Amino acid sequence: MEETTEKKKLDKKEVIKEIFSWIRVIVFAFLVALVLNKFVIVNANVPTGSMESTILPGDRLIGFRLSYLVGEPQRGDIIIFEYPVNPEEIYIKRIIGLPGETIEIKDAKVYIDESETPLNETYLKEDWIIENDGLALEIPQGYYFVMGDNRNNSLDGRYWASEAVMTGQVSNVEAAVEQNYCFVSEDAILGKAIFRYYPSITKLNTSPY
C-alpha cells in the first residue's frame, strides 16, 4: 500500500515537471517571437495592387528591420514604412530618389539630378500614363522618394502632398512639400522587404540599378 502511494506521488511529480517543462518552452518561444517581431522582422500584408507585378494583392512579406544598421537604403529597395500622412498605416513601395537628389518626372520617365538618361525601370507593370509628367522635387537629407511599381494605380510620393491637404494636415500643397509629406523619413522605415512567404516563398528583386 505504501509503495503504491509513493509511486503515485512520484508519478504526480513527473507530470508536474513535464508540465512546467512545456510551459518554459512555450514562454521561451513566445519571447523569441516577440523579440524577432519587435527588433528583427516585420511582417506585412499587401492589400492593394500598387506594387504589381512585383508584389500582388494578398501577398505576405517578411521585412528585415536590421537591414540599414550598417548600410543606407539604396535606390530600388522595396521598403516597409509608416505612411507620412498617417503613420498608423503601413505602406510598401520602392525607393526611387535618395537624400539630397533632385528628381524629375517627364513623359513617364524619371530623371535624377538633371541627368539626360532616365532610370531604367524594367519592373513597371505597364505603360505609365497616370501622373507621369511635370513633377520636380528636391529630396531633403534624411528622406527618400518612393513610388509603386504599378504607377497607374499607386498612392505614392506623387500624391501625398495633396493627401495631406485633403486630410487637413496643411492648408496647401506648397506647405505640404515644405513639410516633407512627399517623402519617407529614414526614421519611418520599418524594414527592407526581403521575402514573400505567401502564397509562395520568393526572394524579392529589390535593387535592379
Image (cartoon, grey):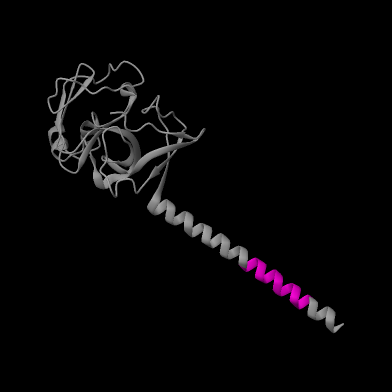
- Across and down, in percent, residue 31 comes to 48, 59
- Give the residue at x 32% y 27%: 154
* Count of numbered labels shown in the rendering: 0
- Give the residue at x 26% y 37%: 74
- Give the residue at x 66% y 67%: 18
Q: Quadrant of residue 151?
A: top left
Queried whether the magenta region covers residue 131, the answer comes back as no
- Across and down, in percent, residue 137 comes to 15, 30
- Give the residue at x 71% y 71%: 14
Return the residue nearer the eye: 17 or 174: 17
- Outermost residue toward the right? 1
Which SS does the magenta portion mostly show?
helix
Report the side of 43 relative to 24 (left or right).
left
Q: Quadrant of the C terminus?
A: top left
Return the residue nearer the eye: 69 or 80: 69
Q: Quadrant of residue 127?
A: top left
Q: Is residue 61 visible from the viewing direction of this image?
A: yes
Q: Quadrant of the N terminus?
A: bottom right
- Outermost residue toward the bottom? 2
- Across and down, in percent, residue 159 comes to 24, 29
Queried whether the magenta region covers residue 10, the answer comes back as yes
60 is higher (above) or lower (below) than 16: above
Q: Which stretch is magenta? A: 8-20
Q: Quadrant of residue 147?
A: top left
- Across and down, in percent, residue 155 comes to 30, 30
Q: Is residue 171 visible from the viewing direction of this image?
A: no
